[in-house]
Amino acid sequence: MKRHEAREKAIQTLFQLDETEITLEEAIPFIVEIPLDEFYEQLVRGTVAYIDEIDALIAEHLENWSFGRLPKIERTILRLAVYEMNYTEVPARVVVNEAVELCKTFSDEKSGKFVNGVLSKMNK
């Protein structure tokens, strides 16, 4: 699995987990087959493990928005990107670019601009 595809699958998994009672172990088989791709698994498990810290970082860098008002897909993409920026060795510019591309796939260009703005502010 290529890294971009792993990110897409991670977004789908994390989206399922947001505001539901489903567990990570239940969500994964809906999206990917076993054996799991190592990068995908790192993204999903890492984001879930650090979700409280990630959400606090996102909330800290929002302007004129509250965390609770964020649309679910943008919140999910931001969570994944913040995990990558803070807990992996992936360069920030790659993370931002991938997040914008994920917005184009799962949402729209306006979402991409919003996510880009938040992540760019965090990267300063």
Image (cartoon, grey):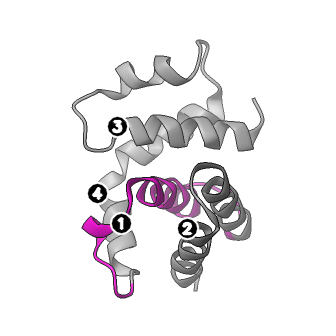
Q: Distance between the residues labelled 4 and 3?
A: 14 Å
Residue 111 image label: 2
SS type, badge 3: helix
Rendered position, 44 above or below 93 = above
For label 4, the crowd category at 10 Å Cα-Cα, with few meaning under 14, some 14 to 19 and many 20 or more, is few
Query: Which tag is nearer the camera, tag 3 or tag 1?
Result: 1
Three-letter amino acid code of the residue under disc 2: Ser
Q: How far apart are marks 2 and 3 (CA)?
A: 21 Å
Image quadrant occupied by the N terminus: top right
Query: Which tag is nearer the camera, tag 4 or tag 3?
Result: 3
Query: Which tag is nearer the camera, tag 4 or tag 2?
Result: 2
Q: Distance between the residues labelled 1 and 2?
A: 10 Å
Q: Residue furthest left?
A: 21
Q: Position of residue 119 (x, y in %)?
A: 55, 74
The residue where tag 4 is placed is 52
Three-letter amino acid code of the residue under disc 4: Asp
Three-letter amino acid code of the residue under disc 3: Leu
Q: How far apart are marks 4 and 1 (CA)?
A: 16 Å
Q: Residue at x 60, y 20 (%)?
A: 36
Residue in the foreground of this view, choosing between 95 and 68: 68
